[in-house]
Amino acid sequence: MPANPGFQSVLPSGPTYRRAPYAADPKAGRGRRIPEPQSATRTDFQRDRDRVLHSTAFRRLANKTQVFVLVEGDSYRTRLTHTIEVGQIARALARALGLDDDLAEALALAHDLGHPPFGHTGEDALAVAMASYGGFDHNAQALRIVTSLERRYAAFDGLNLTWDTLEGLVKHNGPLRSATDTAVPPPIAEFDALWPLDLDKFASAEAQAAALADDIAYNGHDLDDGLRAGLFSLEQVSAVPFIAGILDEVQRVHPQLEESRRIHELVRRVITRFVEDAIAESARRLGELAPADIGAIRAAAHPVVAFSAAMQGAVREMRTFLFEHMYRAPQVVPARDAATRVVSRLFAKFVVEPQLMPSDWGARALAAQSETKRARVVADYIAGMTDRYAVTLYRRFFDDPIDLR
């Protein structure tokens, strides 16, 4: 029985592009943990994407650091703008490979929901604080958000996303269990006990496309932000052979170009090469595997959406450069130290005095049946903060004039 018997479904019979036999099918998945009526106008994967887009956690990404650049301005990436860019690239990869681009986009938009304030610095600090209580992992936190912490719907906590989306969210970087490694972040293990996510297998090709889109976006756009913020120069980054070749090309085609446009021409060519290589290599792998269905993707011995060996080498070179000149640059160390201090001291204070959190969070922490569960509530609260909110709270509780610029 449709949700609205008086309304005729206007769902198209299928996508307008070629769907491969190994693509995820919203009509053939495992559905939702809590059954719901089908939508007359959207597939299940489209509904998942829309629920992520309208979530509170998604909106908060607008005020969460992507990478410290130490320069005020509205042109640098936030966690939200990064996520939107990942979504665009994921759709491009999915379409080229005949996958379900709605699922790929849903996973791309959800992949960073679990990041705490202050980017990877905040995650590192929270992981240290939670080391005695089961640890902290942003993928596991994203799962907690979409299965429990979002409280918007009358019939359930979380977003009640499909199995395919939840599977892709936790396994987009590969299987979490193997014959030699069975350690799984506690929040994922707990949910897996309720609704198994096949943690020993690969996720769908759509999830793999979203993961690779993340790599493409942050490598290209961190290069852009680092150059524009003055953390390193075009001359310095030309030490990376992959980049040097592209800069030479830009110089040949546009010899009189001003620096700002040279940067843009460099970055867009970097992203184009990443995308084109990923499509070609993934098509080659899929051709070799010849998967008859999505089950063959999940049972494969290696990812099917990936860079070529040569491009993997170029990516490693870029990451090494960015790690030294941007993520761990001497200029950003004071800001990283300050961010670590904010997260660490707030966590320690709220574990001891949970009543200082807002009443609903304080009540949850006080009702926790163990110190570990109380710490997890505090971690949930801190992970949901924006940078601005975390700094405001810190200044309220501590006499410490921090500076994150």
Image (spheres, helix red, strand yellow):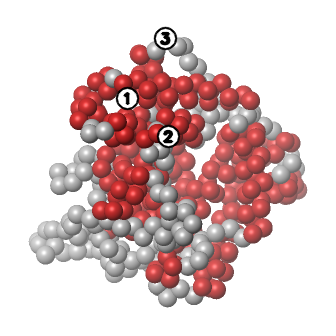
Tell whether 374 sits left or right of 250: left
Residue that badge 2 annotates:
131
Type of residue at label 3? Asp
Identify the secondary structure beneath mark 3.
loop
Callouts 2 and 1 close, C-beta under 8 Å: no
Quarter of the figure with the N terminus: bottom left
Residue 152 at x, y percent in the picture: 24, 47
Q: Residue at x 53, y 37 (%)?
A: 128
**Among numbered discs 3 and 2, the one appearing first in the sequence:** 2
Measured in 3D between alpha carbons, the distance from the residue under mark 2 to the one under mark 1, in whole angstroms, is 14 Å
Tag 1 or tag 3, which sits nearer the N-term? Answer: 1
Q: CA distance from mark 3 to mark 1?
A: 19 Å
Residue 97 appearing in the image: yes
Residue identifier under label 1 = 351
Type of residue at label 1?
Answer: Val
Q: Mark 2 or 1 closer to N-term? A: 2
- The residue at the far top in this view is 399
Q: Is residue 335 above or below residue 211?
A: above
Residue 18: x, y in percent? 49, 82
The amino acid on which the numbered mark 2 sits, given as a three-letter code, is Ala
Q: Along the line of sight, which residue is nearer the eye, 154 or 166?
A: 166
Residue carrying label 3: 399
Q: Residue at x 81, y 38 (%)?
A: 233
Residue placed at 31% from the left, 46% from the top?
149
* Residue 4, above or below 260: below
Residue 363, image x, y percentages: 23, 32
In which quadrant is the C terminus drawn? top right
Q: Which residue is at the front of the view, 209 or 2?
A: 209
For residue 33, what is the image quadrant?
A: bottom left
Decide if residue 1 is on the left or right side of residue 319.
left
